[in-house]
Structures are given as structure tokens and as C-alpha cells.
Amino acid sequence: MAERSFAKEVEKLRLGDGAEFSGEGILAITKALLQCGVGYVGGYQGAPISHLMDVLADAQDILGELGVHFEASASEATATAMLAASVHYPIRGACTYKSTVGTNVASDALANLASGGVTGGALIIVGEDYGEGSSIMQERSHAFAMKSQVWLLDPRPNLPSIVKAVEDGFELSEVSNTPVMLQVRIKCCHVHGKFTAKDNRRPAMTVADALENPRRDTGRIVLPPASFNHEKEKVEKRWPAAVEFIKSRQINEIFGAATGRIGLVLQGGMYNGVIRALQRLGLADIYGDTEVPLYVLNAVYPLIDDEFLEFCEGKDAVLVIEEGQPNYIEQAFGALLYKNGGTSRLLGKGYLPVAGEYTGQVMLDGIGGFLRDHAADLLPDAIRAPNRAEESPVDLPELAKTVPGRPPGFCTGCPERPIFAATKLVEQELGQHHIASDIGCHLFSIMPPFELGATTMGYGLGPASASAFNAPDAKRRSISFVGDGGFWHNGLTSSIGNAVFNQNDGVIVIVDNYYSAATGGQDILSSRAINKSKSTKHPITEAVKGMGVKWVRHLERTYDVTKMQATLKEALTTEETGPKVIVASSECMLNRQRREKPLAAKAIKDGERVVAPRFGVDEDVCTGDHACMRLSGCPSLSVKTLDDPLRDDPVAHIDHSCVGCGNCGEVADAAVLCPSFYRADTVHNPSSAERFAARMSRRVIAWLQKRRDAGRLVFSEVAA
Amino acid sequence: MTVALDHRPGSHVSDRIISVAALAVGGQGGGVLTNWIVDVAERNGFRAQSTSVAGVAQRTGATIYYVEMCRDRGRQPVFSLSPSQGDVDVLIAAELMEAGRAILRGFVTPNRTTLIASSHRIAAVSEKVVPGDGRASSAEVLDAARKASKDHVIFDMERIAVEAGSVISSSLFGALAGSGVLPFPRESFEATIEASGRGVKASLKAFGQAYDEAARRRADETVGLPQAPVVEGSAPVDAPLPLGGQPESEDADDVHAAAPSPAPRGDGRLLAQWRALEGRVDALPPPVRAMARLGLRKVVDYQDADYGAEYLDRLGAAVAIDDEARTYALSQSAAKYLANALCYDDIIRVADLKTRATRTARVRREIGVRDDDLLKVTEYFHPRIEEFCGTMPAGLGRWVEARPKLAAWLDRRVNRGRHIRTDSMAGFALLWGIGGLRRWRRHLLRHEVETAHLGAWYRLALDTAPQDYDLAIEILACRRLVKGYSDTHARGLSKFDRVLSALPMLQGRSDAADWLRRLREAALKDEKGAMLDGALKTVASFAATPTEAGMPA
């Protein structure tokens, strides 16, 4: 794990009974797993749950002491399949991934796991990547819980609550023989808070114990007739057991007045947002104490019928606050009320928007609207009939046109930038092609300045998503991209294997940056780093050849734009049939800098010879056309205004954040741009021979410069 | 209902939840700032909670961090996990356009929010890729900030940080403390920085300067646009350029304000020539002089005093037909664009610029090389046959260009990337030699081509002036389109031709100048000139319907 070290976080996992844990939500969950005596943990990295994986990967010592097995799974399907260890053995197991993308991948294993059921507690922690900051399609994990009939917890977003949810989740899973999903949203994962720790517990049965004493039960395997029994078991045994547990343990919470004419029903994850709206409406204090009745669903599936009906008793209207769509909870409660002859009005979507995150303003408007219509008497006068206008933003329509968008893009020095610069140059020469993109940092190619790529269909599915474009009579080939992360996740079979088998004639570029970079720089099979607990250094080229690809090219330095361009061109024009695979390898610059910077600084301090590269622009040579930036978009390459009234346009400028990756020079070269770029290598602690040679050169150069200046007028300020 | 401490607007700040949102560009260190804010709150007996949205947003995109805090009365409050419109007490923007974005998102409101923003700019990709100047207007955001916020503290915090050898989180933290919006003493902020343990000295320096500046502004209660920060010991010339930012982006059009430049150095004969040329500039009408002097310097620096004389001769033609009532606008424009046209960018020019002593010094300063470290400088050249022929004597160059096979054969030998080390004797000598071709420049093919192009363009402008003075100025300004090297240069020339191709359709119209300006601006909007093509179609459409055409004034 090169991006950062988690040594500090790992120490927090050691906290014992009564100690105060302070940190991120996702780390609290990690600690809670150990407190619950978990026997094994797996998962696939991705925001917002990456840190759970990262910290456990760095916590091998603690895991070893406790006898806990940890695995960085190949995919979410692998992670979920791993929970099979809890089918026959009373071992608690957990896995984690980003959702819904991870749940999509996992759903095959999840359905099988859910059918047979579990003996040991099986907990799936899903990082619900929904709303602001999300990088994926906007869907709900809720649907997966419903279709496989696994239970879904959605605790209030504070550390004590989510830690309790982990504890409850394991127990719930065990009493109902059903896997449990624990849903935590992005901000909940990243919230910093505190809870009182407990001692870590060694699992009652470890995976080693299980291996020594294997068990089997045909009745738990998904094959008829057992599979038919599983379905019955789900509704006849497991469901009632879950309902009974949730009720008796009061997993769902009731706040506010015991009686009242209205009430709010909400997912646990919505709690803080709802309270803030009530605070702003003058109906709650800062501790969340309120007179408004709240029914907080920390378990959103299954729903507890009689709890809800009881809550509705005597109420004229109830508002269901359910983020995302479809509104499964609202629909279920609506049907429930109707069937039971309930007279309360059930409201939800309408006051609240059907789609999108329930932000502070959405909550304020929605709950405020509901209360004004159904319980105006509750509202303080100042809110019901405000003397002054509400605190609202000043309307500045012109500003929206001014402020530029700032989508994420490639980092300074990113090795993927030159790959897309080369692709753009090839397209300038050979025309536009159908380009299929994949998931990973390389998807930023779809943004300016490159604007390359037509679709993204899933992790490792870039080449697969171009598989229809295999027409022998077409003059052009498709180009598809896949990252090393996606390649190992499932690209090797779904994309490469598929292309070989179906004799796809397209070009496949595998972007190899040594890590699963977009998820935080985790190691994967082809990583070049030595990893104590994982097997790395498996070349992608070997895997591709093993799959049967004949035309394979490997570029060991993506920054060589000219070579990248030539290789792509060859791939697009060669007579060779079958998939053309280009593996473009260079280390992720973010990780490389984190690794190398401290080492270089130390070496310089210790008097060792260190060469530090950087690029610069001669501002008097630059003409301000910015062609270089249309092939770069690097944060360190920007524009500046010269203090020269003769010049109209700002010139290119490279700031101190430049890491000297070489893209600027290579692009200027390959695209025949302009000679204003220069590379400046600072040699720290040069040898004496080097110093001497440099002194000689400088002397000669100074003499030549003097000679030239003698014959002309010298305007030093103009040149400087 | 018994509400002990509420969150209603208007309640006393010490009994309320205070919300602080920070908007930054990924990589600016917003996480550090967030941790500091939480720490300083806890240090002062507050409970605090922070959230951030990490993930892909970290990779250079706009990012948001959020902290809520309130006085610790022994019970955990319910904090919100994200900022809401109209519910933000302090909005910190680590870059000016991010302040604009915060205002647009409703996080800055007039009765509630103190806006603390750094006035420096980090250009977004969309601003950088424009062939002209695509940068957003800072003035508009500053104006909006004033209107939208309760209080605003805006100055260049990036610069303060860089000059202190720190990063912007330190100066933002200083401005937050200095603004006095949080009820915590200065010492507690400093204790927070000290406890963080890394780069403490530099962080404290940046913190202190930003604190003082923010406090000074609060004391002044200055209404109106913020002024440039007064930073102790600021030495902009020698200071390294900001780490993540760019120099100020507003265009400075006022030539007259430019300070007079010192006289050049040279031997007696050359200086005498220079004084004679300066004398000719002094004889020009006063409004033309400033630009003519700058133009003259550029042209003489580019070639020699004779070339300067040629420049003034050509300029004289514009002055002769110019109009004092128009403050010699035509001549001013001619002074600017003639100089640019005469100083076309050729290999000789590039080699000359890259081998000057001032350049060596500038590179060392920009890179920030210590005296005992060495600097290796590599230049990237990619000459093609066109540049090769351009540097031949005109006759020979034409002869080669007339033989495509020979030209292609030569191109194969010439056309590749060449990396030349200008810190080495051989590499430097090569470029120095090319720079020395300057004395023969007037006989080379490129000069012939450029001179012909310049002549035609300049004549067109001067011939247009008697009928349409403003249009003539716009024709001169079209020179701005010709820039760059190789393909870029060719594209620039093509845009120049396409813009001027509209002239026959425009001449005689009262709004001709306005339209030519619009065409030129359209040409600078995108690389291929798609906007220009659209604009040309518009011109063609109204040119075809004479009823709509305005008659000459």
C-alpha cells in the first residue's frame, strides 16, 4: 500500500475496554469487527470503504494475534463468496465494498449465500456511494437486500450507532441464519467522531479450527430440492426470527413525544439531516431533543409491521423520509396501512424529491412543507409567519456563467496523461474512432482536454463493451481501455478472454500504473512493490499471452508519447487479426511521489547525489496559443499574464508543483508544438568532476554570450 | 417545549452550533485545515465533528470539507454531516473561483456567513485550453462575494503561504483566526499548529501574516474591493512562483502606466543609433509614444537598429493618416501589432532567446537552484523541412520547396525531435551558432514570406482607414491570431485568413469593426475554429440580405 501508511490508525485497533476511540466512521467499523470476534474479513477497495481494507492490510500483526484471516479479495464477488465460510461453521465473517457497483458484482455469490443461509454471523458492509461526491451510477443497495432477502441495517450516522449496528448485525445474522448488509453512506464513512472501545475478541472458532474439522450439509447447498426448501425457510423461519430480534432488541428507535397528530418515519442514515431541519424549524434543540414523534429505522429491511402500525395510531399524517428511488419503504408502509385499515395519511415523495440526495435544504423544504400543511400549530410563530425573509442566498445569475466547472482530472505528472495525449494525436492523424472506456482514473480521459471515450460499462468491462464492434468490412477498429485494477478484477476473462475467443479485431490498451490507483493505491497482482502478505509482480503481458493474445506490445514508459503514438498507430493499422493488446506501464505519480519524495529529501540532506527534474517554459518563446494544454490538462501547467502590453494572450507557465514527468517535452516533440519547454534537472550534491566540467562549460558559455552581446544593444529587462 | 439551546437563526452564537465549510481544489490540503479546525475547537472546550468527501474528488477536482462545533455542555449534540444553504457561519475558499462556487451553491448568505477566501487563481482546464485568454473574471467573483456575504476576508493567502515556505492551509487558518469569527484566542490556534508537528515554523509564519492581514482588514472595516495584501518583506521578483497558483490573471491594458525602462547597454556607435531612434519616437504624437517605445525595443532587440528604423518608417505611415481627435488609436494599434509582426518567431529567434545570459539567470531563479547545485537544461526542438527551408537563403529555400520529392527526402532527415542540452558546451554552441544567423535573417526565405504577409496586411489596414477608421484598427488587431510554431502557426494563419475573408462582406457596414472584432474573438475561443465558422456563417447570412445591412455612417 504505497499511497499512505496507516500505522497510526492501526494502533487505534488495539484500544481496550473503556478507552476512547477517536477517528473516522469507517475505522470505527473496522474496530467493531475485531470487538465482535470476527474470524475472517475480505473485501474490495473503493470509496468510501477503502480505509477499512487499507487499515486491516497494515494490521497483520493484530490480526495474527487474534487469529483473524484477512484477504484483499480479487473482486466483490470473491469477497461475498468468501462468506461461505460461515455457512457450515459458527465463524463470524465480514466483507466490504462500494455499493451498488460492488453489490452488482457480488450479487451472484450473494444470492447463493442468501439461499442456503448461514450459521456463523455474516456481515456485508456496503459503502453506499450515493449523492454528492459519488463517482458511480445512482442506485440503491436496498433492492439487493429485498431480492435476495438478506437484512439491511441503516444506522444513525454517528460512531456509537454504527459500532452498535456491527454488533447487532452479527447477532441478527446468527439468530436468523441470514447474511446481513450494513449500509453506511459516504459522509458517514468519513465522519470523525468518538466511541468507547471494548476489548478485541478472539473468534470462538477460527478458520484454522474449521479446516481441521470439516463439516458439510447437503441441505445448505443450492440445488433442488434444497433450493426450494431455502425459499420456504426464508419466509417461514428466517424472516420471523429477524423480525423478533429487531423488535425485542429495539433496533429501531422512537424519539419525540409519545403522542401527536403527525410523525416522521426515517431511515437511520437520514437522522442527522432530519434533526438539523427540525432544529432550523425551531422544533429541536441542538441535542436532537424534539416533541415531533420520530420512528427511526435502523433496520430498513425487513420492516416491522406492528411497530409501524403502532407508531401511526392516532396520527393524522406520517411523512416517510426515504432517500433514493424507488421508494420501497414508503410503498411497503402504504400497503401495510391500507391492508390494516389505517386512517393516517402516508406521505413521502412529493414533499421530498423522488431522486437525489436529501441535502440540508431538501430536508428543510420537505419537512417544513409537511409540517406547514399538517401541523402548522407546532411551528413557532417566527417560522410560520417570519417577520424577515429567510436566510436565503443572493441571486447572482451572472456568476453561474463565470465560475468554471472543476471536474476531477489526472494528477500532476500522471502517467496516463501521455497515453491519452498520444491517442488524441493518433486520432488527429487517422480520424475519430469508437473508444470504449473503463472504470479507474483513466476514465478522466472523457473530460477536457482529451474528451476521449464513448461509454463505461463496468469494472474491467472496457474491451467487453467494445465487443460488438467487430466488423471485418469496417475500415476502422475500435479502441478500448482497461486499467490494471479492472484487468485483474475481471477484465482478464470478461474482456481479454472474450476478445480472443470471439476473434475481436479491436485494439485494447491496458493502463498499468502498478496499483489499483483510483481506490487509494492498493497493491494488485501486477504491482511492482514487494508486499509482505501478498504475491505481486505478475506481469500483465504474461497473463494476456496466456489467454491466447498473439499481438502484444509492452511500453515500459508511458511518457514516451512518440512511441505510444507509433504503437497505437501500428495496432490500428496492422494486418494481424485478433485482439491487439498494448500494455502501457508507468507508476502512478501520486504513489511514486509519496514513496520517493521523503527518500530524495533524505538523500539530499545526507549529501548524496540526487537529480531532481522539473519543467519550465520560456515565456518569451511561448506565443500563448495553449496547444500544449490541450494535450495535457496538468495542474502544474497553467497560464499567466506577462507584464508586457505588446502581448494579448497569457502564456504557458509551469509552477513548483511540477514533478518533471516529461509529458510536456514529449508532447511538444510528438505534436511538433513549440520549443518553449525546457527540462531543468537540478543536480544536488554533484561530484567534483561534474562540478569541474560544469564550471568549464559555464565559462565557455559566458564567453560566447559576452561576445554576442558586444555586437548588439542589450535590453536586459526585455529578455529577463 | 423546552428548548435549552437552539439552532434558530439569530440566537446567540456561543449557544449555537457553529458551522464551517471549506471548499478547495483537490490537493490543496483541505484535510489538514479541517483537522486543525476540529483541534482548535476541542482545545477551547467545544465539541466538533468533521466530514469530507474524498474519493475521486481528491484528484484535482473541487472538494468540500465541513466542520460543526458547539460548546461542550457534557452531552453530544446532533451535528449535520454536510453544509446547507443558509446554514453556514464560516465559508473558507482556498481559491477564488471556489468562493464563487460556494456562493452559487448558497453556502454564503448575507445575514450569516463570513467568507474567508484566497484571492489567487488556479485556472480550471476549461480556462486553460482556450487559444486566447479563457480565464474567468476575478472581479465578478469579488463583487459577488461582497454582495453575498455578511463579512468577507479576501486576500492572496497562497502567496503568503509560499513566501513563508508553507502551504495554503496555514494562511487560511491564520485568516480564520484573524477574522475573529470563531470565539477562540489566537494562542489556541497557534497551539494547534504546534501540536501538529510538521513544518511548524513555516506554518506559524504563514499563519501569523495571514492573521495580521485579516485582523487589519477587520479593523479597517473596508467596504469595497479588497486591496493587495501588504506583506512584510515581500519581494515578488526573487520569490519563487506560487506552488499551486498562478500570478494575477486580470489583464492590464494601461500602457501609459508602465514605468520607463532603463536604456540599453552597447558600444558607442550602437547607443548613438539607439538615441537617434528614441528621438524619432519622441517626435511622435504623445499618445503613440509609449507603445512605440515598447515596440521599438522589441524590434531592435529582435534584430538590430536598422530594423528599428524600418519599424518606425512603417509606423510613420499610420501616423501620417491618423487623426488627433481619435487620440491616434490607429497608430497605437499599429505600434503594437507592427512590432509583433516584425518579430515573427523563427528558429533564429528561439536559439537567440535560449542562449542569452539573462535567460540562464532566469531559469536558475525560477527553478530555485542553490549555488552549489548544478543545473542541466534540456531544450526540446522538433524542426521540420518548413523551418529548415525558412532558414535558407530565399532563392535556395524556394528551389527546395519547389521540389516535393527532395523536400520530403530532406524532411525525413530533419523532422524528428531533438533534445539539446544548453548547459553543455556543444549544445549551447549549436544554438548560439543558429542564433548568430540573425545577421543574415533579412536574406532568408522566412523573412521574405513574413515581410510580404506583413506588407499586405498593413496596407489593407491603412487603405481601409480613410473609409472606416475603426475597421482598420480591428484589421491590425487580427495579427493576434498569428502565433505559435509549425502546425499551430499554420492554424493561426488560416484563422487570420478566414477572419479577414469576411471583410468584403463587412466593408461599408456601420457595424463592420464590431463584427470583425467578434470574428476575431470567436477565432480565439477554440482550437479548430468551430466558433469562427459559426460566426462567419452568421456574417454571410446577413451579408446576403442587403435590406438588413446598415448603410455607411
Image: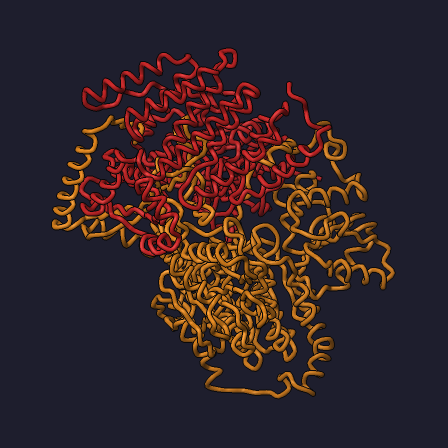
Chain colours: A orange, B red
Total marks drawn?
0
In the rendered view of the protein, which quadrant contains the N terminus of chain A?
A: bottom left
Residue plotted at (20% across, 46% down): B424
**In the displayed structure, does residue A295 sit left or right of residue A522?**
right
Residue in front for this viewpoint, B450 or A106? B450
Residue plotted at (71% across, 57% down): A325
Q: x, y (%) of residue A457? A: 59, 64
Q: Quadrant of residue A456?
A: bottom right
**In the displayed structure, does residue A664 sit left or right of residue A355?**
left
Residue plotted at (35% across, 24% down): B310
Q: x, y (%) of residue A59? A: 40, 65
Q: Is residue A321 above or below residue B266?
A: below
Residue plotted at (71% across, 48% down): A256
Residue in front for this viewpoint, A250 or B548? B548
Q: x, y (%) of residue B265? A: 22, 23
Residue A93 visible? The answer is no
Q: Quadrant of residue A542?
A: bottom left
Q: x, y (%) of residue A526? A: 40, 69
Residue B32 visible? The answer is yes
Q: Is residue B368 above or below residue A434?
A: above
In the rendered view of the protein, which quadrant contains the C terminus of chain A?
A: top left
**In the displayed structure, does residue B301 sit left or right of residue A437?**
left
Q: Quadrant of residue B275?
A: top left
Residue in front for this viewpoint, A31 or A127? A127
